[in-house]
Structure formats: C-alpha cells, structure tokens
Image (tube, helix red, strand yellow):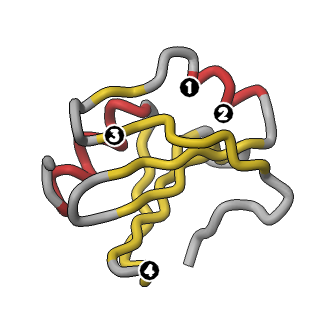
Amino acid sequence: MVEVPQNYELIGNIMTNFDHSIKKGADERLKKEDVYGEYTGWNFFGNVWWNKVTKKFMCMVKQYSVHVDTIASESLEGVMDLVSDQYGHE
C-alpha cells in the first residue's frame, strides 16, 4: 500500500469533482514542497502528492475511510481522469 509520506504537510483541498477543478499552481507546489492536498468527490476522498522517486502524482483513494486504491499519473488532470473513471465523476 502506497501512502502519503509521514512528514508531508496538508495544504487543503486542491482538486474537486464538484466542478472538476484543480487549484491553480497545485501541481508546482506539490512538486517543489513536501506537501499533499485533498481531492474530494461524491463517492471517494483522495490524498494527492508528488512521488519524487517515480516522478508521478499519486492519489490514495478512500471510500468510507478505507483505503481502496492508489492511482499514479504524470499530471493532476490524469489523476482526476483515472480516479473519476473508476470511482465516479460526481
């Protein structure tokens, strides 16, 4: 199971399926700092961070507080597409 590194700081909500938006500058901040952000959807909740080893954005997906998946993509848009396709677009 891949999880957010323990020393990373939460920076709040950076992505939402409410209006399918990604906070401006979130990708650069995740890459440059030891931080992670939240990604909210109707049927899931995700924590998103930049993996410095794989050079990909990671999203630890939870449903009802249970870790169900970890998604990796080269972009935040890719994370949103993959998570939405598997866990709902709302």
* Label 4 packing within 10 angstroms: few (<14), some (14-19), many (20+): few
**x then y, percent, for residue 89:** 14, 48
Query: Which SS class for mark 4?
Result: loop
Q: Nearer the viewer, mark 1 or mark 3?
A: 3
Q: Secondary structure at mark 1?
A: helix
User: Mark 1 or mark 4, which has the lower sequence index?
Assistant: 1
Earlier-in-chain disc, 1 versus 3: 3
Q: Amino acid at mark 1?
A: Asp
Residue drawn where x is 33% and y is 40% of the image: 16
Q: Pointers 2 and 4 in contact (CB under 8 A)?
A: no
Quadrant in the picture for residue 76: top left
Kindly give the residue lying farthest to the right in the view shown. Answer: 7
Label 2 element class: helix
Amino acid bearing label 2:
Leu
Compare residues 7 and 12 and report the one nearer the observer: 12
Residue tagged 3: 16
Separation of residues labelled 4 and 3 (CA atoms): 17 Å
Where is mark 1, residue-wise? Answer: 27
Residues at discs 2 and 1 in contact (Cβ within 8 Å): yes
Q: Position of residue 21 (x, y in %)?
A: 32, 27
Could you classify mark 3 by the number of other residues whose Cα lies within 10 Å: few (under 14), some (14-19), or many (20 or more)? many
Give the Cα distance between marks 2 and 1.
5 Å
The CA distance from mark 2 to mark 4 is: 23 Å
For residue 88, side relative to residue 12 (left or right):
left
Q: Which residue is the site of mark 2?
A: 30
Measure the alpha-carbon separation of dots 2 and 3.
16 Å
Which residue is denoted by mark 4 in the rendering?
65
| Badge 2 density bin: few <14, some 14–19, many ≥20, Cα 10 Å | some
* Element assignment for label 3: strand
Q: Which sits earlier in the primary sequence, circle 4 or circle 3? A: 3
